[in-house]
Image: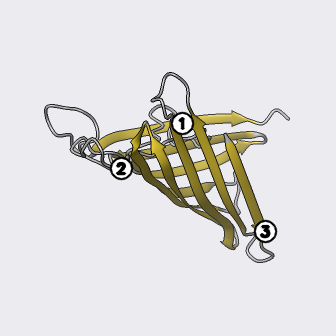
Amino acid sequence: VYGVDASYKFKEYNAVFEAYYVDIHNSSALTTADGTNTSTLGARLTGEPVAKLTGEIEFAYQFGDSQAASVDQDAWAFDIGAVYAFDTTYSPKLGLKYGLRTGQSTTAGATADNEAWNAVLEDQLNGEIFDPNSNIQFIKLSGSLVPVEKLTAGIDFYKYWFAEDNAFPSTVPLDDDAGSEVDITLRYAYT
């Protein structure tokens, strides 16, 4: 695994721009003789365009060899979201996020590019239970408040759709609806 990350903090809007490159090469016996090589090139921008409203946008592209020398990796991921923090009792917050991870259709030929996003040491969490990381698009609605000091109560609602309807082998074509999830959390900051 090789990686490079560079960031720049702007004076305005509390904004941070980040660019990164990660390369993972696996030539173990569990893969093909030539191994796999996945390169990820991405950029992310976060900031506070207006008081109490934070936003983020991120785009990443993957390329390289996927499982065989004759198949190229050609996948991408995209996130955009915002969170508004109300300046009232209990410090409530509301958020909205959209995410997309490309997928590979089963109707693609054997030598077609692999368009399925590879999670590559990902540390994002897009659902406590389902947490998809390839062939998915989703919307997340979130809310939280602090009822007592150090305790945060939150609720997240996820609606998932497959990016490719026929991305999984099946005798019947799949609907693009991948389901929904509701996560209710209580977090206590003990330090």
Q: Which mark is residue 113?
A: 2
Q: Is residue 141 left or right of residue 116?
A: right
Q: Of circles 3 and 1, which is in front?
A: 3
Q: Nearer the viewer, mark 2 or mark 3?
A: 2
* Whole-percent x, y for residue 111 in the image: 30, 45
Between label 1 and label 2, give the one nearer the viewer. 2
Q: Which residue is mark 3?
A: 9
Q: Single out the residue that lies furthest toward the right.
A: 191
Q: Nearer the viewer, residue 17 or 15?
A: 17
In this view, the residue in front, 182 or 116, is 116
Q: Amino acid at mark 2?
A: Asp
Q: Earlier in the sequence, mark 2 or mark 3?
A: 3
Residue at 14% across, 35% down: 172
Element type at mark 3: strand
Q: Quadrant of residue 89?
A: bottom right
Q: CA distance from mark 2 to mark 3?
A: 36 Å
The reply, left or right, for residue 107 in relation to residue 65 is left
Whether residue 152 is visible, yes or no, is yes
Numbered tag placed on residue 86 in the rendering: none
Q: Secondary structure at mark 2?
A: loop
Q: Is residue 138 visible?
A: no
| Label 3 close to label 1 by CB (< 8 Å) | no
Q: Residue at x 47, y 28 (%)?
A: 31
Q: Secondary structure at mark 1?
A: strand
Q: How far across and how far down the image is residue 79, in percent?
A: 51, 57
Q: Report the residue marked by disc 1.
A: 184
